Image (cartoon, helix red, strand yellow):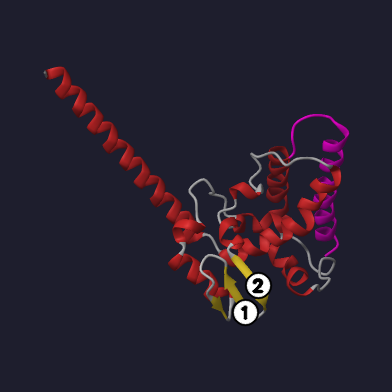
């Protein structure tokens, strides 16, 4: 009898511990989501789609799933998939069909009405936290309007470039599969060239 009582108590404690863990995970995830800028993440995603991902496609190298830029980790990826842009003043929710005049009101709608569908605790990477590396502030006019400001501004000041360079090296190691095959080498060289171009622009400004 004592054995069964003890066994039952153990199961209860385990269930309680599991509930506490789930609540903690949910709280941590909510904090990440609250602090993650959706507009800056959208800009970072555009830069990845237009500059970085095409290099992987061109060289035929599959992005390592440990890479923080891998779409499977993007905290707002599902949110973005729910959006249908009909025009600059017409945004449709693919979940319920409601339409909005601005992208911002669409974003608020997703957070208020479809939060359980739009966000998953398996996706925890906030792309806006990589904006210093991706040079979001400099490339924003290019992404938004097609202005060629890439050569007109320094991508970073001398003090911050060393830290960004180290971060870039760390990202390269996480994103490109290890190995010496020609495709991986070609991709690594291409991404290093982008990094060196950033340094060159910084020096001449």
The 10 Å Cα crowd at callout 1, few under 14, some 14 to 19, many 20 or more, is some
CA separation in Å, label 2 and label 1:
6 Å
What x and y, as percent, mark residue 182? 88, 34
Would you say the magenta stretch is mainly helix, strand or loop? Answer: helix
Task: Report the side of 30 relative to 179 (left or right).
Answer: left
Q: In the figure, residue 113 lies in which quadrant? A: bottom left
Q: In the figure, residue 86 lies in which quadrant? A: bottom right
Depicted 13 relative to depicted 101: above or below: above
Magenta stretch holds residue 183: yes
- Boundaries of the magenta span: 176-205
**Pointer 2 residue:** 85
Residue occupying the point 58% across, 63% down: 82
Q: Quadrant of the C terminus?
A: bottom right
What x and y, as percent, mark residue 25? 41, 46
Q: Are marks 2 and 1 in contact (CB under 8 Å)?
A: yes
**Pointer 1 residue:** 90
């Amino acid at each position: 009898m004592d054995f069964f009582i003890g066994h039952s108590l153990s199961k209860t404690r385990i269930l309680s511990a599991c509930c506490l863990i789930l609540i903690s995970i949910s709280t941590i995830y909510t904090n990440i989501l609250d602090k993650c800028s959706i507009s800056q993440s959208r800009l970072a995603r555009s830069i990845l789609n237009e500059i970085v991902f095409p290099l992987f496609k061109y060289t035929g190298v599959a992005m390592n799933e440990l890479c923080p830029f891998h779409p499977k980790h993007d905290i707002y990826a599902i949110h973005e998939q729910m959006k249908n842009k009909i025009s600059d003043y017409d945004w449709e929710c693919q979940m319920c069909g409601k339409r909005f005049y601005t992208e911002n009101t669409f974003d608020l709608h997703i957070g208020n009405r479809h939060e359980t569908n739009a966000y998953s605790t398996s996706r925890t990477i906030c792309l806006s936290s990589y904006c210093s590396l991706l040079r979001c502030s400099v490339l924003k006019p290019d992404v938004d309007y097609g202005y060629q400001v890439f050569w007109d501004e320094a991508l970073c000041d001398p003090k911050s470039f060393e830290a960004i360079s180290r971060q870039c090296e760390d990202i390269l190691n996480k994103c490109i599969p290890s190995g010496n095959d020609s495709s991986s080498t070609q991709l690594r060289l291409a991404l290093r060239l982008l990094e060196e171009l950033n340094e060159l622009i910084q020096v001449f400004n």
